[in-house]
Every structure is written in C-alpha cells, then in structure tokens.
Image (cartoon, rainbow, N blue to C red):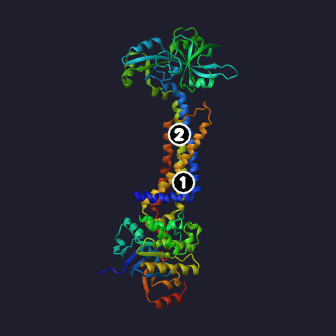
Amino acid sequence: MKQIIQISGFLALKEIWRNRSRFLLVSLVIALITLLVLFIAALGEGLGNGNREYISKLDAELITYQSKSDFLIAASRLSKDRLAAIRRVDGVADVGMLGTANATLILPGDVEPLKVALLGVQPGHTGEPAVVQGQQLGTDLSDEVIIDKNTALRSDLQIGENLTIRVTQGTKDEFYTLRIVGISDGQQYSLQPSVFVPFYAWDRIKPKSEAEINSSNPVANVILVKLIDPEAIEEVSANIAAQVNNVETATLKEAIQALPGYSAQQSTLNLQGGFTLFIGVLVIGGFFQIQILQKVAQIGVLKAIGTANPIIAMASILQIVVVTMVGVAIGGFMTFLFSLSFPPTVPIVFNGTTTAVAIIALLMIGPLSGLVSTRYAVRIEPLKALGLS
Amino acid sequence: MMNTYALETENVTKTYQSESGVINAVDEVSLQVKPGEFVALVGPSGSGKTTMLSILAALLKPTSGKVILDGQDLAAMNEKDRVAMRRNKIGFTFQANNLVPYLSAVENVELMLRLNGRLDKTGKIRSRELLARLGLAERLHNLPGQMSGGQQQRVAIARAMIHNPSLVLADEPTASLDTERAYQVVETFAGLIHEQNRAGIMVTHDLRMCEYVDRVFQMRDGKLVQIYSTKSEIMELVKGRHD
Ligand SMILES: Nc1ncnc2c1ncn2[C@@H]1O[C@H](COP(=O)(O)OP(=O)(O)O)[C@@H](O)[C@H]1O
Ligand SMILES: [Mg+2]
C-alpha cells in the first residue's frame, strides 16, 4: 500500500509539475466555481440570518400563535388572557408577549431614515434580548428602547441618546421619541435591523388602522414560551393545546421555516449552489476525461512495463484531488479577499459550518467527476503500447 | 534436467475469430532463446510478429501452448502475476510513444526500479551510468519531447535493461530512425544483451538490422517457417533482400 501511494504520488505530481500551466488553468476554473459557491452559501446564510436571527436566538422553546394563523406571526393575534392561560400550563417557566411592526427611524442630519423592525417585548421576560452594552428595559410602560447591533451600526446612535420613530396611525404620521438604554447583539427580524420597546409602549406607538386606534385592549402577535425542561417540548405543547383555547404552537425551527419567504429563499439559493457544484463536476470531469483520452498510449506503456492497476487508479485520483484542492484553496483565498471589501450592510455572512459544508462539497466534486476518467484509465489495455487494440 | 533456456515456447497458438472465419495469428510456434542470445523475429506484414511478441511479453494470453520464462509458464498465469512478470523479468522497448512524456530520461529509467521497489542509491547511480554508456550523459534531465527519436530509443533501451530482466523485447526499435542511427541503436542493444547475458528478441522489418543478431526467426502466416542460425546464413539474408 505504501509503495502504491509512493509511486502513484510520484507519477501524479511529476505530471502536474511538468504540465503545471495546464493544470493551473483547471485549478483556476475550480477557484472561480469555489468563489461562486461560497458566495451563494454566504448569501443564503446572510439572507436567512436576516430573516431568522431574532427568532433563532430566542431564549424560548415554543412560540404560541392564534390558531389557523399558519404560523404567520404578523397574521396572529393573541390577547392578554391567553398569556395568563399559557403561564398556568405545567412545564412552562416563563412567557412573554411579542408584538411585531415596521417603523422608520428618523436620524439626525441628512441621513436617510432607517426602516426597522419595531418589536414589542416584555421587560424581564423571554423575548427581550440580552444587551451587550448598557441596560435592559425598565418597565412595561417606559419610553426606553434597546437597539440591536445592526441598528446601532447603521444609525450611529449611542446609548443615552434619543431616537425618533415615525409610524403611520390611521391617516397621520406620528412621531415618538424614546431613549436608548441598551444595545444588543445582532437581532435582525424580517431582513431589518431591530428596535425593542416595552410591550405597552409598543402597543401605543405601533402603526394602527383607523379602527384599531380606538380599541384599548392590547393585543400581541404571538406569545413566546420558555420551558422548565427544554427537552419536554412535545409534552408541553400538547398541554397547551389541551388547556388553552384557540392557539397553536410551533418550535423555533418550525417557526423559522414558516417565516414569510424563508423556505423558498433558502431552497432557491441551495438549488443555485447545487447547480454550480454540478457545473463544476461537469467541467472537471470533462477536462480529466479529455486528458485521459490523450494519454491512452502513455498509460498503455506504463501498464506494459508492469505498473499495477491500483497505481494507475491512485495516480489518477491523486491528480484530481490535488488539482481540486489547489483550486479550492485559491478560490477560498479569493473569497476571503472579496469579503473584506464588503460593507456590513450587504447580507453576506461567512458562517463556519455553512462554509465548511460548501468546501467539503467542492472538494468532493473532483473525485466524483474523476470517477469516469479513472475507470477509463484502469481499463486501458497495455497492448495499446504496441499499437494494438 | 537443468533449464538452459531463458525463454522457451511450446506450440504457442493464438486464434482470433473474424468475419471471414478463424485466423491463427500465431500457429503452433515453438522456439527457444538462451541467456546472452539476441534473436530477430522477421516476416511479412500480418505474419504474426507483433502477436507473438505480445505473448512473449506477457501482454497477451495464447489460446494454447506454453511460454516458459525462467521456468514459469506465462500462459498459465493470472493477470496480476503477469503484471509482476512484466515488471521484474521483462524489459521492453516499443515502436513509438516509448517513454513517459512527463518524466526526464533518468526518471524514465529509474521508474523501472521504482516500480520494483528497488530504487536505491546504487540504482540511481547505475541508471546514470547506463545512460552515459548509451551516449546520453548530457541528456539525463531532458524530457522525451526534448530528445531526438534515436535518443528516445536509447533511453528506452536503458529502461528495458536497468532492472536486470531475463528477457528483453524490442518492437521495431529502428522504425523511426535513419539508417545510421538505426545501426547505432541496434549495435548498442546487441552489445548490452551479450554483455549482461539477457535473452533479447527484436521484431524488425528491416533485414539489414539482422547483422547484429545471433539467430533469425522467420514467420509467415503465423507459423515459424525458418530459423537462420549461422553467421553466413544471416549475412545472406541481410544482403539478399531489403524489404
Ligand atoms: N485483435 C485481433 N483480432 C483479430 N485479428 C487479429 C488481431 N490481432 C492480429 N490479428 C490478425 O493476426 C494476424 C497477425 O497480425 P500481427 O501479429 O499484427 O502481424 P505482424 O505484426 O507480423 O504484422 C493478422 O492477420 C491480423 O489481422
Ligand atoms: Mg506488427
């Protein structure tokens, strides 16, 4: 075995080195494919993250929706009595109301207004993000906000400063001024940076239709549920279904899949990534197949002078692996250089796992596409060396 | 009894099925070659020379008959054992595309030792010495593409002999060379075979090349029809016809 690797390694590397410009060209094609695949993966991660970030970081296991809301947060309405009912269910540690809305931040100076997700959460309860700087929200009624890192980055607002929110209520634009007490890590929701306000303040400032303005009963979209035992998801969600009327529960994973456009977007990007990999398989496979066809006589000679088939096969695979690895390395480095020049507002996130999966997939396309040519190489008759069939 | 032959065949036959019926490409050929003996295989086109050489080279299994090399029957071996025989008991030169194009002259020669797991310091020195002996001292690190046809043939000869094989086979070694180079190559080849005591077989179209061989086997229609064994018989053949 050791000898097989030694000899095949010698042959494979010598051939690459003596034809390095040709092999480098193939590696560069692989590098470009790598660049494309990694960017598609990063875009998928960035867009997906922009959609789900707040939900995926929740310190809760279940989300309770109004029944028949199809797990659409914006379409769900739950009043305060549901909150009390859910809190009483066995296994529930904490509950928190969540209200979602869109709003616009009016920024000082000539800066463009910033569209944000206006999220109403209950101070001290699940749903309120932990601050990385400053303080948590005070009371349910206070005029305080926590802004997420993305809002802070794009608005340049600091802790202690006031922030002005513009919302449309009925037919009028209303302006509210709130004081920033804390900044959380990234908590995007619905592809927007987030602003967290105490729930009752949210209820007061959220955009309302003419009809809603006069109704005084505060209504949340969904209720977040934190469990005593995070493992007991199924049990508790069955309890909620049995004990609370007109609600349905989803795990965070289900809730994320149900976010508007989320699944469609992710599957589109996955398809694009997969397709790019497939093109890679065809390109590399095509190159090595053509190369093998040109090498029939020379492989015939190698076999005729007693080179065993495992050496021929191993040399062919090694060559493909080396060319692919060099290509992926160059492509990875190019991706890294490109990513440095991207502003933070571009939804491109190089997540370790996603990138690793993409790189493994890229490294696999070489050997995969080389199967045909390797098989062909093994089947070449040594008689070819004598110019016979 | 002691086996005095390096190579011995017994009624070797190779049959091909074709549209026009059965062809005996090689028909009941029995021959013997001693160590240190250089023989030529001649005959008109289609007479079975290449087929016979392929069988002797353990590249092709005969339909029937025996091919005894160093006491072992190649015809009875499986593919794996035949590959091993080709690697350590047989040396080859081919008509064209002889060398591995991405290996230098010395790397091509060393490859034979490498394949046998025998490439050590002595092996490297011997490879260089053998190439120098063949007039290629200045060409050790040239790629085949940078050498002339005659130089490539000489590298191929070095490769065919470096691992001390019992049998050295050459298929039309002079086909792509001009007359002067052709004589040179065959003369060196013959010299090495005699000196190192190998059994050498050369297939050739060019009867003039038989000047350097010890015996000539003539084939026709797959059969071994004539053996020229004495110097005078051979010289008559060399001078008689040029085909
Ligand atoms: N693979 C094959 N299939 C069918 N017929 C073959 C095959 N190889 C050789 N032959 C036939 O066997 C005969 C001998 O061929 P060959 O050994 O090539 O002769 P030479 O080398 O003396 O020209 C020819 O008639 C040729 O057509
Ligand atoms: Mg022939």
Q: Does mark 2 have its CB less than 8 Å from ligand 1?
A: no
Residue A310, percent across and down? 42, 59
Q: Specify whether residue A17 is in view.
A: yes
| Relative image position of residue A84 (x, y in whole percent) | 43, 12
Estimate the x, y position of residue A312 in percent, counting from the top left: 45, 60
Is disc 2 in contact with disc 1, using a CB cutoff of under 8 Å?
A: no
Discs 2, 1: same chain: yes
Residue that carries the numbered disc 1 in the rendered image: A286
Residue A83 position in % (x across, y down): 44, 14
Q: Compared with residue A26, is residue A217 higher up or lower down, i.e. above or below?
A: above
| N-terminal-most mark, 2 or 1 | 2
Classify mark 2: helix, strand or loop: helix
Residue bearing mark 2: A271
Crowding at dot 2, Cα within 10 Å, few <14 / some 14-19 / many 20+, comes out as few
* Residue toward you, A385 or B133: B133
Q: Residue at x 39, y 14 (%)?
A: A88
Above or below for B189 versus A187: below
Viewer can see residue A304:
no
Q: Residue furthest left?
A: B1
Q: Where B126 sits versus B228, above or below?
A: above
